[in-house]
Image (cartoon, rainbow, N blue to C red):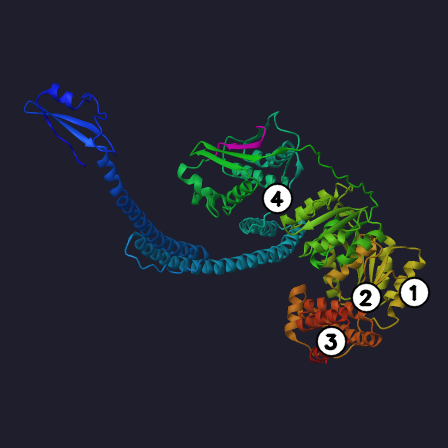
Amino acid sequence: DSGLYVRTVLDEERWSSEIPFSVSEPRPAFSLFSSGSLFLVDKVSIGGADIYVLQSEGLLVMLRNRLLPILSIVVLGVFGFSFVLSFSLNAHISKALSELLKGFESIKKGSFSRVKLNSNDELGEIASELNNTMGFIEKTLDRLKNSNELLRKVSKEAQQASKMKSEFLANMSHEMRTPMNAILGFAELLMNEETNLEKMKYLKTIYRSGEHLLSLINDVLDLSKIEAARFDLMISPYSPSKLVKELTETYLPMAYSKGLHFANSITERVPEYVNGDEFRMRQVLTNLISNGLKFTEKGYVSILLDYDGKHLIYVVQDTGFGVSRDEIDKIFEPFIQADGTMSRKFGGTGLGLAITKKIIELMGGTIRFESKVGEGSKVTVRIPSQVSTEIPKQKEKAEIPASGKVIVASENEDFLIIVGSMLGRNGVRFEPVTNLANLSRAARELGASLVIVDTPKNASEALTALDGIDEAAIIVITDASKDEVQFGDRADEIIQKPVKEDELLSKIGNYFELKPKSTSDKYRILLTEDNEANQLLIKEVLEKAGYSVDLAGNGKEAVEKIRRNNYNLVLMDIQMPVMDGYEATKKVREEGYKIPIVALTAHTMQGDEEKTIEAGCDGFLGKPVKQYDLLEVVHYHLGVYGKNGNRRTDGFSKPGTAKHSSDSISFFAKDMGLSMEEATAMFVEYGKHIDKTIANIQSALEKKDMGFISREGHSLKGSGRMYGVEEISEIGFVIEAAAKNYDEQGVADNLLRLRKVYRRFWE
């Protein structure tokens, strides 16, 4: 009842009559079973016979009913197996990926926890490689950490060293310039007075060598400040055209002296004012121009100034020796010159161009050096510059009348002597101030028109001292170029040490009409002194300060000379033969002479000063006379110092036997240019002075007069050095400090030390 039915059709017509259906397409032929029909499936021709393949619908239904459950079970099984397999694989992969992610997270955190994955597949290989990578990174980081720690340590040490270097340089700047000021200052004083040609040659050599040393100091300090990043630029409006013109005027004499042409060219594009650091730009151009003039024997040196809208362009060109291409890069290195023979021939430190290049780079600019050997060099500097809309304010210089009051402020006695002599020779009267803390008050009380300030080691002290000085013009004497920036807004004029007389007078000349005195116009002083050694010493000191000195051996001779000559000042010894100083002074006053008279005496017992004043003296100076004290008193009474000028009244007490150090006397004699006999006599007098000073300090200590004790200690400090008794100088220093700190016990202890020294030297 099911299956395929096949019949050989021999007679198509017969077959067709028995089973009627269309051969051309499958269709139900007849109803063989109640459940379905037959369908023609295919027709096959075999051996001339046609074979028809028929299919029963019932068979299909049977097959469907039997196969469908089996097929469903198979499909469900396949899906179930796939689900289980997929779930297992997903769990395995998820776990592996989770472990790998934990590994990457540990790398980010720096813990480097190893991945624990037991798998032989590709994920296991990835985990293994990740663990190896973590090990490598961990070792690398450990090495890097150690290196960084070492670098931090080295960096800290370098910073500390740099700080110490900067502090050392700041201190050395002051410590080196201070003695250089004294060396060059005194050398200049001696050159002004020396007539011996051979000695003049030596002095000029000293002076030139000192200036060369000072230049070297400046270069080294500038380079060190740049390298330590302590080199600041001060931006303000300035005129580049004016700067170039001023430098041209400055270097014209040098060019002419070598037979060179020197000129400038400034284009119309250059703005009137730009914002920049004029001081450093001047330093750059000064170096380039001076190098051009130094290394050019014939031809010309020129400077061109142009502006391209963003940059100032400076071009310095010369027809000098030139530099080879191989040497061009080296010339900007510190301490390097293009040719060693150049250094030997022309000198120089080789720092100039190194400093110049670094300054230009700090300004954001560039420098280009072009040169050919035998043809010359061309240096082009480009500096970013913004046109300034602000016109720099010009300082209004105070016009000081000839009778104007001048203050010179310094805590350095050598400075006061040097500057005092320079001013005294040129008729400038001034008031000394030795404590900067009192400067502002002194300027107000005196009504000063001009203040000359010597900056101390700490420049801020001078800045503070200048506060409140509004009516007077201010000239600041600085130790270093950096101070020029600090005092730029406070000072009317700035002079860098060492002080040169011509430069100082030029600056003062902006406020005074100076009339330098000729030899015949010098202040004339009569020295009345019966001791030839004292005559020689005092006369030498005064003449070196620019004064004309006449001598008188006693009071009678002094009166006669005063009648015949015009003197500006009389120094009158009190104890003299024929006629003493008291009687001589009375006669001078009785005859109507109003000339200032200063008493010189070794007797300063209580009441002695009053006696000299009653006799008609205007001042009082104790012996032995020290250079600073003598000039201070002379300047005061000649009007070179103002009315508040300090006077020293150190004196001596009763004479005593002397038993003192021959070494100290030898030192004193050599230092003062005296014979041993003269030095011994003065040393005896000095012992009397020490005896009196001990009594005065003891009395002041009982009265708790620390101000007086401080002054006495200061006097001991200076006199001890002068007479070669360093112990007294040291004790004086300690007594002065103790008195300023109101340390009574400290004063008492050191007064006892002073008594012991006195007994050892003079009793």
Contact between marks 2 and 3 (CB within 8 A): the answer is no
Left or right: residue 153 versus residue 136 is: right
- The label nearer to you, 4 versus 2, is 4
Please name the amino acid that badge 2 sits on. Thr
Mark 4: few, some, or many residues within 10 Å (few <14, many ≥20)? Answer: some
Residue on which disc 2 sits: 649
Lateral position of residue 620 relative to residue 107, left or right: right
Q: CA distance from mark 1 to mark 2?
A: 16 Å
Residue at numbered disc 3: 746
Let me know if residue 22 appears in the view. Answer: yes
Closer to the eye: label 2 or 3: 3
Could you tell me which secondary element the residue under label 3 belongs to? helix
Residue 763, position as x, y percentages in the image: 72, 81
Mark earlier in primary sequence (4, 3): 4
Check disc 1 and report the residue beneath it: 614
- Between disc 1 and disc 2, the foreground one is 2
Residue that protrudes farthest toward the top in the picture: 13
* Residue depicted at 30% across the width and 54% down the height: 125
Name the residue carrying label 4: 233
**Magenta stretch, residue numbers:** 308-320
Mark 2–mark 3 Cα distance, whole angstroms, equals 25 Å
- Mark 2 element type: loop
